[in-house]
C-alpha cells in the first residue's frame, strides 16, 4: 500500500515542490483512511519600513539615519530549508506511528467486545484525537526578527533624551522615546530598540 500526500487547498505540484514527493510507502499500514499532519511553513511578514532615524535632544538636535546591518529573515529561511527534510521525515513517521497505534487499539477493542461497530467507532475517536493533537511546532517561528540596523554616534558624557523613529514612505509608523539616557566615558553605551510587527 501507498500513502498519498496532499496539502489543503493546494495542488500536487505544490506538495511535490515542498516535500519532494507526493507518495510514500504505507509501511504495512492497511485501511489507513485519512492521516492528518502539519508542518511549519515559513512565510515572510514583509516589513514596510524603509528608514529608521535616531534623534538626540541635548546634542544640538543631532539626527542619524541607521544603516542596514543584516537581513536575518534570509538566514532564517536558509536554515529552514536545510532542516525541512528532517522535519518532514520525523513528522510523517510520528503520524504513522500514532495511526498504527489507533488501528491496533480499535481492533483490540473490537476483538475484546466481539463488537465490530464498537471497534470502528473507537477507531474514529482515536483518529479525532490524533488530528486534534497533531499541530506544527511553530513556537520559535512567530517572533523571528526580519532585519537589524545600526548606527554609531559620538556623544560627550552626559544625559540625553533619544527617540528612535520608524518610517515608511515618509510616514512615521512608530516613535520609541527614551528619556534620560546616560552616556558614560570609556564604556560601551548601547541602546537597543525594535518594532514588533504583527500585521501583514
Image (spheres, rainbow, N blue to C red):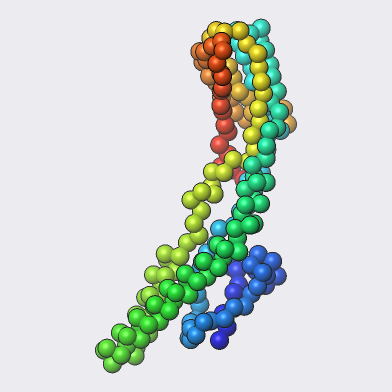
Q: Quadrant of residue 18?
A: bottom right
User: What percent of the width, then of the height, locates residue 169?
Assistant: 73, 31
Q: Residue, x 61% and y 23% (percent of image)?
A: 164
Q: Residue, x 49% and y 57% (percent of image)?
A: 137
Q: Quadrant of residue 39?
A: bottom right
Look at the picture and state if 100 lies above or below 153.
Answer: below
Look at the picture and state if 152 lies above or below 168.
Answer: above
Visible in this render: residue 124? no
**Quarter the N terminus occupies:** bottom right
User: What percent of the width, then of the height, locates residue 83?
Assistant: 59, 58
Look at the picture and state if 86 lies above or below 197.
Answer: below
Task: Residue lying at the far front in this picture: please name it.
Answer: 186
Question: Is 26 left or right of 18, judged from the image as shown?
Answer: left
Q: Residue, x 50% and y 77% (percent of image)?
A: 34
Task: Residue lying at the far bottom in this picture: please name it.
Answer: 114
**Quarter the C terminus occupies:** top right
User: What percent of the width, then of the height, locates residue 125?
Assistant: 37, 75
Visible in this render: residue 105? yes
Q: How many marks?
A: 0
Q: Residue, x 69% and y 66% (percent of image)?
A: 17
Look at the picture and state if 168 lies above or below 101.
Answer: above
Task: Residue lying at the far left in this picture: please name it.
Answer: 113
Q: Quadrant of residue 8?
A: bottom right
User: What percent of the width, then of the height, locates residue 127?
Assistant: 42, 75
Of residues 89 and 67, which is closer to you in this image?
A: 89
Amino acid at each position: 500500500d501507498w500513502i498519498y500526500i496532499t496539502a489543503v487547498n493546494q495542488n500536487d505540484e505544490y506538495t511535490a515542490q515542498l516535500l519532494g514527493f507526493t507518495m510514500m510507502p504505507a509501511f504495512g499500514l492497511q485501511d489507513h483512511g485519512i492521516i492528518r499532519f502539519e508542518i511549519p511553513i515559513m512565510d515572510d511578514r514583509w516589513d514596510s519600513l524603509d528608514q529608521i532615524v535616531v534623534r538626540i535632544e541635548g546634542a544640538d538636535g543631532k539626527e542619524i539615519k541607521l544603516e542596514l546591518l543584516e537581513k536575518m529573515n534570509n538566514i532564517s529561511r536558509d536554515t529552514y530549508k536545510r532542516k525541512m527534510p528532517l522535519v518532514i521525515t520525523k513528522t510523517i513517521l510520528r503520524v504513522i506511528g500514532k495511526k498504527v497505534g489507533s488501528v491496533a487499539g480499535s481492533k483490540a477493542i473490537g476483538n475484546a467486545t466481539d463488537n465490530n461497530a464498537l471497534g470502528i467507532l473507537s477507531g474514529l475517536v482515536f483518529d479525532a484525537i490524533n488530528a486534534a493533537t497533531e499541530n506544527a511546532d511553530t513556537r520559535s517561528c512567530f517572533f523571528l526578527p526580519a532585519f537589524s540596523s545600526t548606527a554609531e554616534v559620538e556623544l560627550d558624557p552626559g544625559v540625553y533624551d533619544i527617540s528612535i523613529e520608524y518610517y515608511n514612505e515618509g510616514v512615521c509608523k512608530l516613535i520609541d522615546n527614551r528619556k534620560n539616557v546616560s552616556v558614560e566615558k570609556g564604556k560601551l553605551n548601547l541602546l537597543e530598540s525594535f518594532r514588533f510587527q504583527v500585521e501583514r
